[in-house]
Amino acid sequence: MPAAERRVKLLEAAYRVMSEGGVAAGTTRAIVQEAEMSLAAFHYCFDSREEMLRALIVDLSERERGSARLALAAAEAGTVTDLAGTVRMALLGYLDHLEQRSGEELLLLELNHHALRTPALRELATEQYRGYYDGIQQLLVGMAEQTGVRWRVGPEQVARLAVTLTDGLTTTWLADRDSAAARQTTETIAEMVAGLAAPA
């Protein structure tokens, strides 16, 4: 089996193990057992557990950004023409993703905290959020153009606020699983974000 294919299988195994038991459960032995590979195969593909965690964080972050892009594309393609409605549709799309893939989101949150406490991985947490800010900023600029408004503050500030609010939406939903309350929260967030815009 080629090394690239082994890496993918090991990352998938790591995801399954850690989704169920958390980062602490993701020992190299548990991962190779789940992947039905030898410990030597693990060390052939990754120099260390930290390198594997780095690859897993990058992979999950890319998946999450892909889901966010799909949710926003769906919102932009919809019949809603006002900014608040477009933001609301995007947030509801993200909430659907969160409900369907809660284990993935919880693991990504835990990996982010692990990275913050691990000097060799800390920059990944920074990169992860930089990616969120940049991606959301691009989407907000597109939403403003689509709905005929302009941002009254810099779109980078709006993006940071949107990421902060979405983080809160994520962690509170993971804590209480109250989807009705989360949907009400999306309404408030959408109105707050739209309040930072004015007619173009």
Image (cartoon, rainbow, N blue to C red):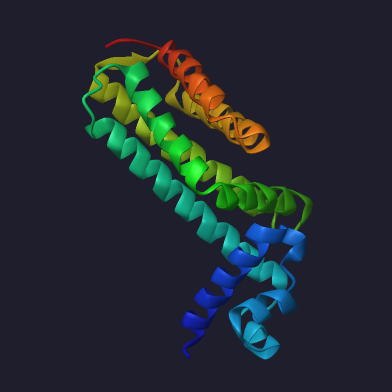
Total numbered badges shown on the rendered structure = 0
**Taking the image as drawn, is residue 109 in sight?**
yes
Please state the horizontal and vertical placement of residue 54, each as a whole percent of the image: 62, 63
Quarter of the figure with the C terminus: top left
Residue 120 shows up from this direction: no
Picture residue at 63% right of the left edge, 58% below the top: 19
Residue 95, above or below 56: above
Q: On the image, which quarter does residue 34 sit in?
A: bottom right
As drawn, 136 above or below 153: below
Would you say 80 lies left or right of 9 here?
Answer: left
Q: Is residue 160 left or right of residue 49?
A: left
Q: Residue 1: percent from the left, percent from the top? A: 48, 91
Q: Residue at x 72, y 60 (%)?
A: 21
Residue 199 horizontal side relative to residue 45, left or right: left
Instruction: Please report the residue visible at 59 percent of the width from the left and 34 percent of the height from the top.
Output: 167
The residue lying at 62 percent from left, 88 percent from top is: 41
Q: Which residue is at the front of the view, 127 or 105?
A: 105
Across and down, in percent, residue 115 comes to 71, 53
Above or below residue 134? Residue 38 is below
Residue 78 % position (x, y): 23, 30
